Image (tube, rainbow, N blue to C red):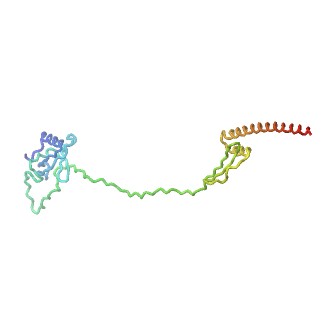
């Protein structure tokens, strides 16, 4: 194919199908591409032709630049990166410097430079070493003190214990003292329970006293009879 001709509509469609199949077809730059005419590149993408006429993205060397179909032609089989059909270059003027070799090229027509792909810079901020949480050591206080007021078998007893050490073994206290101690505890129902216990004990004591009085009266009557019999 003549490198001076651009891609036809059918060739563009063929390239589109090749890209869809995972292939990257080779193309040759035409004369309208400027000084890179005759060089070979690979089509890597077709963008929207309605957005820009240069919708054929070609990889050439390390660059990926967009071109129009007029700048490209289908590369013949076996074409490498060199010129397929060398374009006669104008004779250099006297004392003219030799042409600059690839990979740097100057395009005749203005091109939109490809955005330089830079690796994202990750700012690493040094974090201070994690500080271990230090538990505040509380001073060890004295062991807990427990004072117990108990009632069992008709007796009130008080005991005191600090931690696992017994400070006072259970000793008997009077019911009136037990009632005073309970009065200091402002808990509903506790004082009522103590008063109920004391009321029951009082009733039993009165019954026992009545019984003893009756027995005492009988003994005194018997004693009087014995005195009269002298």
Q: Is residue 59 left or right of residue 197?
A: left
Measured as percent of width and height from the top left, residue 57 is found at 19, 46
Q: Is residue 122 left or right of residue 24?
A: right
Quadrant for the C terminus in the image: top right
Residue 191: quarter of image: top right
Q: Residue furthest front?
A: 230
Q: Is residue 144 left or right of residue 9?
A: right
Measured as percent of width and height from the top left, residue 180 is found at 72, 45
Image label count: 0
Q: Is residue 203 above or below residue 38?
A: above
Measured as percent of width and height from the top left, residue 26 is found at 13, 47
Residue nearest the viewer, comparing 143 with 16: 143
Residue nearest the viewer, comparing 196 with 16: 196
At horizontal 35% and vertical 56% (from top left) the residue drawn is: 124
Measured as percent of width and height from the top left, residue 50 is found at 21, 40
At horizontal 15% and vertical 40% (from top left) the residue drawn is: 13
């Amino acid at each position: 194919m003549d490198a001076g001709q651009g891609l036809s509509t059918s060739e563009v469609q063929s390239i589109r199908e090749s890209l869809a199949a995972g292939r990257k077809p080779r193309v040759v730059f035409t004369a309208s591409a400027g000084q890179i005419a005759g060089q070979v590149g690979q089509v890597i993408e077709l963008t929207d032709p309605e957005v820009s006429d240069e919708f054929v993205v070609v990889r050439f060397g390390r660059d990926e630049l967009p071109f129009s179909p007029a700048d490209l032609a289908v590369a013949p089989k076996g074409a490498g990166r060199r010129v397929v059909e060398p374009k006669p270059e104008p004779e250099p003027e006297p004392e003219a410097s030799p042409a600059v070799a690839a990979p740097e090229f100057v395009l005749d027509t203005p091109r939109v430079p490809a955005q330089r792909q830079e690796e994202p810079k990750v700012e690493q901020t040094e974090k201070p070493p994690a500080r271990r949480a230090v538990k505040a050591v509380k001073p060890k206080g004295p062991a807990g003190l427990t004072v117990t007021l108990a009632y069992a078998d008709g007796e009130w007893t008080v005991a005191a214990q600090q931690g696992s050490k017994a400070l006072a073994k259970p000793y008997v206290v009077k019911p009136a003292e037990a009632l005073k101690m309970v009065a200091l505890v402002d808990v509903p129902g506790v004082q009522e329970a103590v008063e109920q216990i004391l009321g029951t004990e009082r009733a039993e004591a009165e019954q026992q006293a009545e019984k003893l009085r009756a027995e005492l009266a009988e003994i005194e009557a018997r004693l009087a009879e014995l005195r009269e019999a002298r």
